[in-house]
Amino acid sequence: MDLQIALLLSQDGIVNGAIYALLALALVLVFAVTRVIFIPQGEFVAFGALTLAGFQAGKVPGTLWLLIGLGAAIAIVEVVIAMRSGALRRLTSALGWNLGYPAVAAAVVFLGEPVSWPLFVQVVLALAMVVPLGPMVYRLAYQPLLSASVLVLLIVSVAVHLTLVGLGLLFFGAEGSRTPAFSEASFEIGGVVVTGQTLWVVGASAVLIVVLYLFFERSLWGKALRATAINRTGARLMGISSTQAGKLSFVLAAAIGALSGILIAPITTVYYDTGFLIGLKGFVAAIVGGLASYPIAAAGAILVGLLESFSSFWASAFKEVIVFTLIIPVLVWRSLTTRHVEEEE
Amino acid sequence: MKLKPLAAGLIAAFATTQALADITVGVTVSATGPAASLGIPEKNTFALMPTTIGGQKVNYIVLDDASDTTTAVKNVRKMITEDKVDVIVGSTITPNSLAMIDVAAEAETPMISMAASARIVDPANPKVKWVFKTPQNDVQMSTAIVESMLSNKVQTVAFIGFADAYGEGWYNEFSKIAELRKLKIVANERYNRNDTSVTGQILKILAAKPDAVLVAGAGTPAALPQKALNEKGYKGAYYQTHGVANMDFMRVCGKDCEGTLLPAGPVLVAGQLPDSNPIKKVALDYTSKYEAAHGKGTTSTFGAHAWDAGMLLQSAVPVALKKAQPGTKEFRAALRDALEGLKNVTVSHGVVNMSPQDHLGFDQRARVMVKIENGGWKLQQ
């Protein structure tokens, strides 16, 4: 192994690590705010990428039907609840969002011609189709279980994951897709070719992390999420609704997932079930951060990316084994340090 | 004591209704899960099969085993005990098919597998008496690749395959034949179907400077190593396996796959076969039926394996019907004997000549070398 190979492997590891970092951040965020271990995080990666690929192939992506279906299901639930409690006035906004929004999305897809639109508009449209699925899943699957234990929420997560993977196969078929690169540019730095798309991935991840930081530090909504994460009861006493915080965290998680998918779709082939493994590696990174610390989770993600890239060079058959074995020493170290903290308390 | 003749009468009456019953074909395919891209065209193919054979109505019961061994076995048990099937077709993949052998042999029901491994019909296993299969053995395909490599003056070759039974099986077969024919394997790498990057493996292959690279993967995931190699400027020859013989692979790999060579069943290039080849007519019949139902360019060689299983039944069932009635143990045994006795049956993948030692029955006519040219398959002479 010479320096050039090491540089190429590091570049590859950092690009993958940047995606894992985004997913790790989303997982930490969702867990901190709602105590949900969000296994379906990876599905949003696949849905984002495949929805964009669907637009480019001139097809109506199946996520539209999912959007309409989930919207209708929530509308029915809301109507039943409103009938029982007699609070019919609040119904208008709920119905507007859950029936009106999918209808608008469907109108745009069917009346417009997304295949002929510029890439940027297609990306925005794909995000507009996939991101609302996050809060919709929250409303249907998690909101009724607001005070359930972490274990129950984990079981629900597994169920949601399996449902979404099954729907993904139905919508997009078993074979994968690729999308064209955001930029065809490539540069040579120190004898190593860097393509424009890898810069896009790393750059977009870095920007997103900064935006998230500012969101949590400076905006009222961000502060409300942090408050809920630190102390749910206390936050509620201050007038922060747990449901609203939960919904918001799912919006962010879905947006991060879908954007990650759109970023990697030009680099690799995305399948209906690609997201799970990517999400799982983000999960390993999130575990490194103890499902609590954002910076450590991001650093852990880069570590996972580099470890994966170098182990694929030295022992490709054992790559996944090596990456997932990382979790054992991390858990040992975690459990040792956590006991230490408890003693301090 | 009076009950006994009554019971006997009931059984007899039941047996008669059974005897008048239709032929029941129990199918288990992997229409979901990792092997879905193979299982879906197979599932679609059963909908196109004739509904009568030899004047008898045929019922197809098609179940999905989700590429899972336990579910496949469960499906087979259910179809044997509840539906009283006369023959089992399936499954799509090797592990499922191997697990199903025991159940089929125990129930003395003939089984036709659509999976590739030669182990499924290994004559050393006595239970295999009941088992037949339609896809070519990997060893036949490996031989074709090695011959093509030698005629193209390839001396060193790098191997990159799936980190599962498919890649491992291919490496075993390919390395054996390569060693015999003095072809040097300079790199042996693995990757996963879902991997987002193969940079590490590719760099290692490039460092070994092989004359050719063989990618052993199935469907669209097999495009990833080739795209990565092209990106890094590899100039040697590319070989793929017959696992990529569908249009989705072409769609994803695009111009990066131009010039790639692969072995495949003749059905893939049916239109280009010489008119003298008996396979041409049969294969074209299948592709036109499938494309009429599912659109142009949708046929895959996997669906054709299912079609061939149907064709074997169409030849064997009339023979068995002369000996016994469907729904009986005798019929199942007669059907097995008839399948084993098939001679010169032309199917879409080749010409079948079964024998007690060979429950696949294919010869060299069952494979051709194909080159990817202008986004299509081109038959190599």
Image (cartoon, coloured by chain):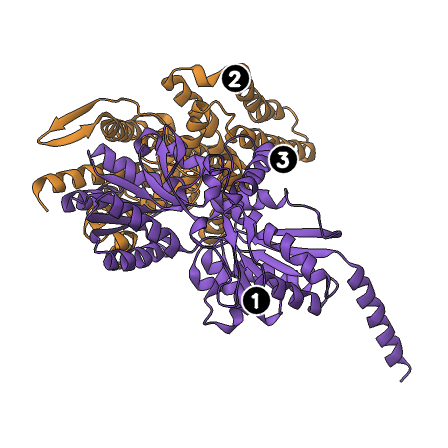
| Side (left or right) of B305 relative to B330 | left
- Is disc 2 in the same subunit as disc 3? yes
Residue A56 % position (x, y)? 43, 23
To which quarter of the image does residue A25 belong?
top left
Residue annotated with mark 1:
B130
Instruction: State how far apart marks 2 and 1 are (Cα).
Output: 57 Å
Task: Identify residue type, mark 2.
Answer: Val
Q: Who's orange, chain-wise?
A: A
| Side (left or right) of A310 relative to B221 | left
Query: From this viewpoint, is residue A28 visible?
Result: no
Which one is nearer the viewer's eye here, B307 or B90? B307
Residue A269 % position (x, y)? 36, 36
Instruction: Check the image and name the residue furthest to the bottom.
Output: B1
Mark 2 and mark 3 lie on one chain; the one further toward the N terminus is 3
Disc marking residue A77: 3
Query: From this viewpoint, is residue B138 visible?
Result: yes
